[in-house]
Image (tube, helix red, strand yellow):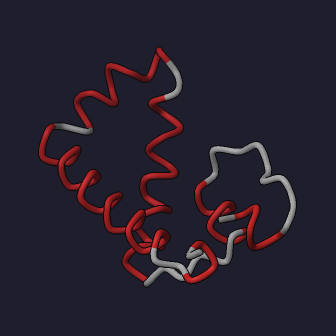
Amino acid sequence: MVAIATREVPPRTHNLIQLSKHGSANLNTEQIQFIAEINTASITTRYPEELAKSLTTFNRDIAIEYLRKSEDVIKCIALDNRLQK
């Protein structure tokens, strides 16, 4: 989506907020808040020393909720007219 919106190679980043802005994603308020939340959460999961803490913080129920919300964001992005051909 970023490549289509900017006609440039997307930046090399894990920052979902930055990517959604570069791609001009048409997300609702709840989706924007969620990507901000998961963006912060993903930082701790990339570092082994933080893994134990992450496993207790992100239990099964939270993981299921994140999966559902992630699916909503993906569906929203997939429906963007710029991606339709």
Quadrant where the image shows the C terminus: bottom right
Residue 73's place in the image compared with 11, above or below, is below
Residue 38 x %, y %:
43, 52
The total of numbered circles placed on residues is 0
Quadrant where the image shows the N terminus: bottom right
The picture quadrant where one finds residue 33 is: bottom left
Relative to 9, is 71 on the left or the right? left
The picture quadrant where one finds residue 20 is: bottom right
**45 and 76: which one is in front?**
76
Residue name at image x 85 percent, y 67 percent: 7
Residue name at image x 37 percent, y 78 percent: 30
Residue 42 x %, y %:
48, 41
Residue at the outermost front position: 85
Residue name at image x 51 percent, y 52 percent: 39
Residue 14's place in the image compared with 54, above or below, is below
Residue at the outermost left position: 61
Residue 44 x %, y %:
48, 33
**62 and 56: which one is in front?**
62
Residue at the outermost right position: 8
Residue 70 x %, y %:
35, 58
Residue at the outermost top position: 49
Relative to 69, is 85 on the left or the right? right
Residue name at image x 49 percent, y 71 percent: 77
